[in-house]
Image: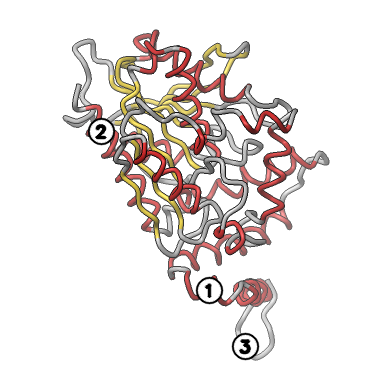
């Protein structure tokens, strides 16, 4: 990095400061200081990646490689696990890669059954249905395991545009059904399951829960909790979608439309009751934990879905996290709210598991 004469500032420092100053004033005024620190790191790291990384020619593969590289910093550190194992589970006609984190200690809430099997949180990652894998969310998985005392089964479902809806949904539901019926093979208590996900993973969590309710009630009966973090639940437009999102978070209106276009082979598929969950019968669901981000185009989705849950007789644990952007859950190395949310969500699940 080259210093600017008389300032002691590097070119990279100046470029990062310029990008921060280019953020809309309304956004800079709302962001917490820690969220701003995250963006400073993101801008600096983006410049480094552009200089150092050789990305594939294929645009989607390049986006995935860059996403993995960007998330690498955020996945360093965090809780150590007693064991981490990787395997495949056959679901929806494919062998789905999964990673099972078992925490070092199991507290009373997540205690093992008589066979030594621990309850399991199945985690479905975000990334607009097109990005993400077992590595991009690994620290999140370990945080949930550590604070819940349960194992976390991370599910590496098939991505779009290579596959279309409802393939990923059926893979997630199929993995859950396998764990419910054969969890003992992995040291898991198939009678105590929870689903968790961020962003697109929230949609897969609620969609898979509803699919199992309708088609596999014996598996659905084992589902004790849902953890839904800044998900999209069916809104096509909202005040938040027009007020928030931009080049700084990859969540502009046309970015959101692009995710949808990649996911569906037929636009009519977007009307599935397992996608349009704001218009779906929500009866019978287990307790729901929800967190949204104030500066996120999807924040209205959470508010609307929470209200629909209440109309269906549920009492969701819901909170809007102030001053943070979409994807904030990843940034626990610098952002306290990420760690608070993961701890709260894990403890919520543990409380449901403790009920037997």
Residue drawn 33% across and 52% down? Answer: 340
Q: Which mark is on residue 28?
A: 1
The 10 Å Cα crowd at callout 2, few under 14, some 14 to 19, many 20 or more, is many
The 10 Å Cα crowd at callout 3, few under 14, some 14 to 19, many 20 or more, is few
The 10 Å Cα crowd at callout 1, few under 14, some 14 to 19, many 20 or more, is some
What kind of element bears circle 1? Answer: helix
How many numbered marks, from 0 up? 3
Q: Quadrant of residue 216?
A: top left
**Dividing the image into 4 quarters, which one contains the N terminus?**
bottom right
Contact between labelled residues 1 and 2, with CB atoms less than 8 Å apart: no
Q: Quadrant of residue 27?
A: bottom right
> Is residue 80 visible in the rendered structure shown here?
no
Say which residue label 3 marks.
Answer: 7
For the rendered model, the colour scheme is secondary structure
Of marks 2 and 1, which one's residue comes earlier in the chain? 1
> Is residue 74 visible in the rendered structure shown here?
yes
The single residue placed furthest to the left in the displayed view is 108
Front residue (pair 159, 202): 202
Say which residue label 2 marks.
Answer: 350
Q: Position of residue 332 (x, y in %)?
A: 42, 52
Side of 30 relative to 45 (left or right): left
State whether residue 318 is above or below residue 243: above
Which dot, 2 or 3, sits closer to the camera? 2
Q: Position of residue 93 (x, y in %)?
A: 62, 11
Which dot, 3 or 1, sits closer to the camera? 1
What kind of element bears circle 3? Answer: loop
Front residue (pair 49, 162): 162
């Amino acid at each position: 990095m080259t210093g600017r004469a008389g300032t002691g500032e590097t070119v990279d420092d100046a470029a990062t400061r310029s990008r921060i100053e280019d953020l809309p004033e309304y956004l800079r005024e709302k962001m917490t200081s820690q969220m701003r620190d995250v963006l400073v790191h993101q801008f600096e790291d983006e410049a480094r990646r552009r200089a150092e990384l050789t990305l594939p020619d294929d645009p989607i593969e390049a986006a995935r490689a860059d996403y993995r590289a960007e998330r690498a910093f955020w996945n360093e550190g965090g809780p150590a696990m007693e064991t981490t194992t990787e395997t495949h589970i056959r679901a929806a006609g494919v062998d789905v890669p999964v990673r099972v984190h078992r925490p070092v200690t199991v507290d009373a809430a997540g205690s093992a059954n008589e066979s030594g099997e621990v309850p399991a949180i199945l985690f479905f990652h975000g990334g607009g249905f097109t990005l993400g894998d077992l590595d991009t969310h690994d620290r999140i998985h370990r945080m949930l395991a550590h604070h819940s005392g349960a194992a976390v089964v991370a599910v590496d479902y098939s991505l779009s545009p290579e596959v279309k809806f409802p393939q990923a949904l059926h893979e997630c539901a199929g993995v859950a059904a396998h764990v419910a019926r054969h969890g003992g093979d992995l040291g898991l208590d198939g009678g105590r399951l929870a689903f968790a996900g961020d962003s697109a993973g929230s949609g897969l969590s609620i969609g898979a829960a509803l699919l199992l309710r309708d088609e596999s009630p014996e598996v659905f009966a084992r589902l004790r909790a849902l953890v839904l973090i800044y998900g999209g639940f069916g809104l096509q437009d909202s005040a938040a979608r027009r007020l928030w999102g931009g080049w700084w978070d990859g969540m502009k209106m046309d970015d959101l439309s692009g995710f949808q276009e990649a996911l569906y082979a037929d636009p009519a598929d977007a009307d599935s009751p397992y996608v349009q969950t704001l218009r779906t019968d929500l009866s019978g669901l287990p307790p729901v934990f929800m967190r949204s981000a104030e500066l996120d185009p999807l924040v209205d989705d959470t508010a609307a879905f929470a209200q629909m849950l209440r109309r269906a007789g549920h009492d969701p644990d819901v909170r809007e996290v102030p001053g943070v952007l979409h994807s904030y859950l990843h940034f626990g190395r610098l952002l306290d709210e990420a760690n608070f949310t993961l701890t709260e969500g894990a403890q919520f699940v543990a409380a449901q598991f403790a009920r037997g």
